[in-house]
Amino acid sequence: MPQSRWQLVSAPSPPIAFVEQVQQYCGDGGGHFAAPLLWQRGIQSAAQLQTFLDADHYQPTSPFDFGQEMKWAVKRLDQARQNGDRVAIWGDFDADGVTSTAVLWEGLGQFFPQGRQLSYTIPNRLRESHGLNRAGLERLAAEGTKVIVTCDTGSTNLAEIDYANQLGMDVIVTDHHTLPDDRPNVIAIINPRYFAESHPLYHLSGVAVAFKLVEALYLTLPNLPQQPLEQLLDLVAIGLIADLVQLTGDCRYLAQKGIEQLKKQKNPATATRPGVQKLLDCCNRNGDRPTDIGFGIGPRINAISRIKGDASFGVELLTSRDADICDRLVTETETLNARRKGLQKTVIADIQKRLGEVDVSTTGVIILADPQWPPGVLGLAASQIAQEYGRPVVLLNTQDGDMARGSARSVANIDLYELLKSQQHLVVGFGGHPFAAGLSLPVDKLPLFKEAINQQFWQHYSTQISLDPVLPVDLVVTVADLGQGLFRELSLLEPYGMGNPVPKLLIETVRFSQTSFFNIKDKSGNKVSYLQSKFTIADSTNPSGFPGVWWGHHPDELPADQDCDVVVELDFNTYSRRYEVRLIDFQVSRPSQAPLRPGLPEIIDRRSLPPSQRSPLTTGYPVRTCPVSWTELAHAYHQAIAAQEPLVLDYDFTPAPISRTVEKIQTLWQQCQQQPQPFTPTLLQKHCGFSDLLARQIVTLVNESPLTPTTDPHSLQATLNSLQALIAEEAFQKRYFSQIPLTPAFLETVSSS
């Protein structure tokens, strides 16, 4: 497996005024971790901050923003209600599709009698593909169906839609996948991909689009529903987060509101879904965080069709009010999920073994096939391999000998759908979106398919995409920083997802200890071939250590008695009732020096050395004052190039209390008035260690508003407040440059600034 390249996400430090705004949401926390994260992610004003952190201040978009398509859909459904036409929901078998079906089953069930006038059907994952199929359409027509409402599927099923029309059935498509070139022959197609990418509805997943259709019916026929619309939001949150869509705009709002609803399912006094309540109990989750879906409920719902094929009982599990039925379904779901974990691990190990025997560096798209690989876990395996190897992956099952069927996943803004579309003359069927797709093709076409799709890849991406796996790192912290305070700040940004990923934390020079492992067991107590390793990490700031977990690995893979740099995510273990880190990657620590590129000088880092260990420099171009900008650091680097010496970072930063620094400025100003002598930037730099920019800003401020006892008290206080803000902002920037590690991103920024 290739080593990931760590890349620190660099961005200008947020202004102190923004940090103070964030602090209002942090309670006892300081906001110094949350503020840079928010600033990096484009949340840079008080208004943005309010709507991002507090869903009650967000104005959700009307379902009728879908325009005439939504009106046509509502009109036809109302006609069906009045005429007694049978309506069938056609869903999909992943978590987004199952929750979409459940939302329509409950939502449309407020307008159509369930079972008698309303039904649902979901293709079998192991026998059928995504989308409409002729056999299913013929069955629905024989049952007297007049209207089909798809969810999370259908946009590109042009031939099947025409066939449904021939059978006398109208089709309403609700979907979020790639659009067809021409509008299908449907009553309505409700798909957010018709919007501009900046539209707040553009990133809706299938379940959210289905919810918008139900919402439109609620608004049109407000006197009919008996169940409040918000009771569907927990299902919406499950589908949204499990489908890994970008959680911005209405997606984020619906996920936030949905998690509020999901929390109610944990408490027996407020629970309305016994199936969801039992799922939360099984995975030891409270329902109050997106990880409860991403690592708890979502994988379990997906496991139903991955192993069993038939996902229909997943809808019953989510919507049934019968506790006994739900208990039986949850028990079966747990068994299926345990089986899924073991199969997934086996397939990934097989793939990694194969890839270890070839030169992957010459491959643009990894395409592998095997008759023994279970089709239900190929999407999960493809996703993990794509992340590890930094390139698109297509995994296929060839069990039936003639046809290969499987899943594909992409990375790094590589449009997988367009790559597959370029080879549609070779495939029997495919569908999906730029990052995930399913496909099938004749086995004898596989060699040509591999060659053609890689050729297409290199033509489009050879000069645009780096295929080295990149692991973005958001913050540099210490072991002492880990715990409740940091967790609370990071949880402000939840729910995480695409466009707002879980923060990756870099901790340098740690050691692993107290390692252990066990095989996960299913609900029946049977071991599953899926490892969980536990450990403790410690550094100089916290020698006693902090707990962590590493999924799918054995502790023997961790270095013993060696300093390591680690990338982790901070989490709360609801089962153990403790904060812990989840290990993402590690590297054995290198010496504190970093070569840049051949022919360019190295950078030697002495920032962490105590004064007693800082031997006099005999070589190198030293930087002894902590910089406040990339430009300043880059200037020193280019000076080192001119001197043909390594750049030596020989500074540290220990901030003095701001109030004491302001007092020193007042004293210096008063001394200058008494002598008299000019109050200059040079004087401030000498006595206070300020940068040239800050020193000039302070001189300008004080000359305009003198610090004398005779100055108006309000004006004097305003000047002192401004001084504190200026000093605090520079202190924040210096703290950043005193701690930022020498990652490739750091080196590239210094050399190119």
Image (cartoon, rainbow, N blue to C red):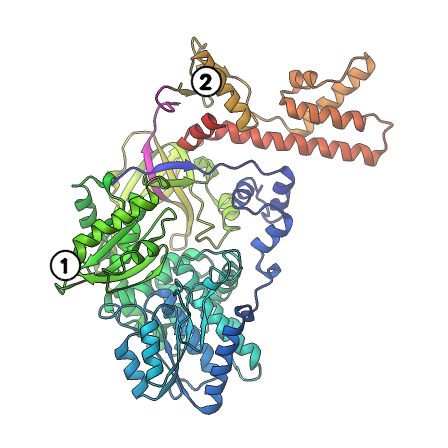
Q: Is residue 588 magenta?
A: yes
Pick whichever, 183 or 371, lies toward us.
Answer: 183
Task: Identify which amino acid the numbered label 2 is placed on.
Answer: Val
Q: Earlier in the sequence, mark 1 or mark 2?
A: 1
| Percent of width and height locating residue 401 | 12, 63
Residue occupied by mark 1: 444
Estimate the spatial distance between the alpha carbons at disc 1 and disc 2, rounded to whole Å.
Answer: 60 Å
Residue occupied by mark 2: 648
Task: Identify which amino acid the numbered label 1 is placed on.
Answer: Asp
From the viewer's perspective, is residue 632 above or below residue 437?
Answer: above
From the viewer's perspective, is residue 721 above or below residue 247?
Answer: above
The quadrant where residue 4 appears: top left
| Percent of width and height locating residue 163 | 31, 79
* Span shown in magenta: 583-599
Q: Residue at x 42, y 52 (%)?
A: 577
Pick whichever, 611 or 63, lies toward us.
Answer: 63
